Image (tube, rainbow, N blue to C red):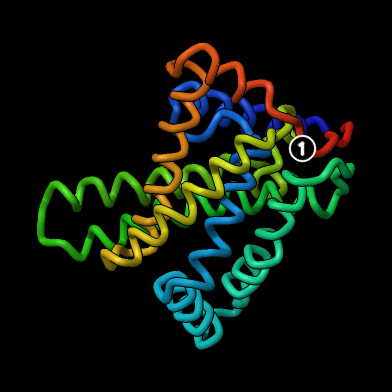
Amino acid sequence: MPGATKSVASSRKVFEYLQKLRLIPKELKETDLYILGLSFIVLLIFTQGLSHDLLRAAQWDLDSTASRKGGIVYSIALLIISSPIAIYIALTNKKINKFQSYCIKFFFVVVNALIAIAIGIHSLQNASLYLEIIAIWQISQAVIFIIFSGFEEIGDFYDLPKRQARLHEVILATLIVLAVTAYGDYKNWYWALIFSSILLVWRIADGFLKNDAPARLRLLYSRSPVLGSKRLKD
């Protein structure tokens, strides 16, 4: 249908423009899936904040008087199902099937948006005008991400991972998740702050080892064995 095709093309242009502005992530990588999946599982099991917020959201959804309810419960269930799938994809060489593709794209978009929304709501509880402005920006960015990441399904504008995860990247990501979670839990940080700190430390450490570390260390890191999964051709 010409109208639908035009709508998809317009939506994709907005998606690509937002990527150029760095308002949403540029691509979907297996290392990102791995660290997001592992962080979600570790925070869900070993800290109370994430599980408490998800249960409260699910209860609100079930108690809602809206004619169409259950969407939040469905999203939470899909997040829980998708988190081990994200890890599995990074650690195996199996082809990604359609169900896995749907799950990881949904997981990638919704987890990133969930972190931004949670930090935003948490910051709104602070009296500082500066934090309120940051909170509104975080929530707005998350909503934009969800709306413009796909046309028929959340995240369907993202391609499947093109770059395969490497052993040293997975080891580094695992150490960062465990270390930052342990430190954040000890300091009683809010779960979304722990999650965002994990991603920040990961980007800094990974970037350093790829670009700024001594040549021998960069070579060792870049030539580590490939794990990853084969990309399903569209």
Residue 91 spot, x, y in % from top left: 75, 46
What quarter of the picture does the C terminus occupy?
top right
Residue 86 spot, x, y in % from top left: 69, 51
Picture residue at 70% right of the left edge, 50% below the top: 104
In this rendering, does residue 168 appear at all? yes
Total marks shown come to 1
Residue with the most extreme bottom position: 63
Around disc 1, counting alpha carbons within 10 Å, would you say few (fewer than 14), some (14 to 19), or many (20 or more)? some
Is 88 displayed left or right of 191 in the figure? right
Q: Nearer the viewer, residue 3 or 209?
A: 209
Residue 135 spot, x, y in % from top left: 27, 51
Circle 1 sits on which residue? Answer: 227
Residue with the most extreme top position: 215
Is 128 displayed left or right of 94 in the figure? left
Vertical order, 110 against 215 (above or below):
below
- Please tell me whether mark 1 sits on a helix, a strand or a loop: loop
What quarter of the picture does the N terminus occupy?
top right
Residue with the most extreme front position: 216
Q: Nearer the viewer, residue 153 or 106?
A: 106
